[in-house]
Image: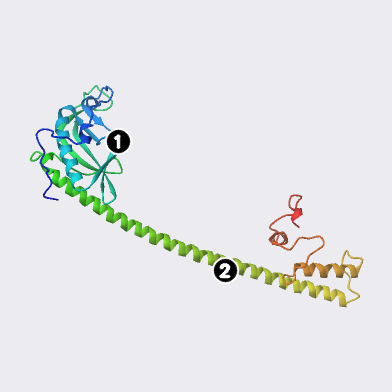
Amino acid sequence: MDQSLNLRVPNKLVKPHTMVVEMNLKEDDPSRFKINRDKIINRGDTFDFAVGKKSLVRAKLILDSFVKAVEKRGLKIMNCEGITFLLISEEKIQIRLWEKSRFLEQDENSCGFRDQELSGELYFQYMRRCTCVEKQWGDTPYSKLEEKLGRVNGSLEYIGKKEHEQRLIREEYWREYERKQVIIKEENAKKEAEFSDFKGLLGQSIRWERTQAIRKYINCVEVNPNSTIQGIKDRDEWISWAKAKADWYDPTTSCDDIYLNEFSSFHEELLEGKKRLDRNNVCKL
């Protein structure tokens, strides 16, 4: 910590910081809970604090010294919607000034929440995820918070720098992760395209093989004048029709057909029994 900083807390406010001046006394609505009646919670445009009326003057003195020391270090305090952040190495470190409270003994016949009383002990708290106290510095039976401001400032700066380092590590990790994901995505796309092309090749080879079988059958009928085809009267007409259908089905020719659309996966699924022909899809033939 910079030894030139004045971290001694005075007995009275001298040219108080604007943030301290604006710590207006604003009490919550009356409540049956003692803690809410005695504690002043100011969460507006000034420092996030919650202290009792008896501790308010002391809290202002501590906070005034703290804020001035922080700003002399070139750091900045930011208040946003009732939450206070100390900006260190581009990191927002959430802090607050808090007075500890204790639960009171509850009457055997009473029910509901237990009342609390303020202890007079003040703490600077470093918060994580808005509500979780990660670390705190405050009054003990042997020392007061006023004596620990140098430790508080030094610790918060260290925390800010460590969080900045950790954030850079996380960002680098995620950059590398995203880079690897792009590579994996590209490789998977190539694999998918390769397999799709192979699937198409396999399908075409099977069609071609089936076409050869069809043509052999047509040729057998054609060269054998005595061959008969069940349900067919005009043999020559059938041979002409069959050759046209073979040319339509053959992937190496894919000739147009007078009635049928170009052979597609729809036709394949019909042939394999995966689909049924009905009035809704007959137009795709």
Tell me the SS state at disc 1.
loop
Picture quadrant where residue 230 is located: bottom right
Residue at the bottom extreme? 223
Residue 103 seen by the camera: no
Residue drawn at the location 31% of the way across and 58% of the way down: 169
| Above or below for 277 versus 99 | below
Q: Badge 2: how crowded within 10 Å, few (<14), some, or many (20+)?
A: few
Picture quadrant where residue 225 is located: bottom right
Q: Amino acid at mark 1?
A: Gly
Side of 268 where 108 appears, left or right: left
Q: Which residue is mark 2?
A: 194
| Above or below for 270 versus 143 | below
Q: Badge 1: how crowded within 10 Å, few (<14), some, or many (20+)?
A: some
Residue drawn at the location 17% of the way across and 37% of the way down: 64
- Picture coordinates of residue 170, whole percent (x, y): 33, 56
Q: Nearer the viewer, residue 172 or 12?
A: 12
- The quarter of the picture where the C terminus appears is bottom right
Side of 144 where 257 appears, left or right: right
Residue 208 seen by the camera: yes
Front tag of 2 and 1: 1
Spatial CA span between label 2 and label 1: 57 Å
Q: Amino acid at mark 2?
A: Glu
- Picture coordinates of residue 221, whole percent (x, y): 86, 74
Side of 166 where 5 appears, left or right: left
| Above or below for 205 versus 9 | below
Residue drawn at the location 23% of the way across and 50% of the way down: 159
Q: Nearer the viewer, residue 5 or 96?
A: 5
Side of 239 where 161 appears, left or right: left
Tell me the SS state at disc 2.
helix
Q: Which residue is mark 1?
A: 82
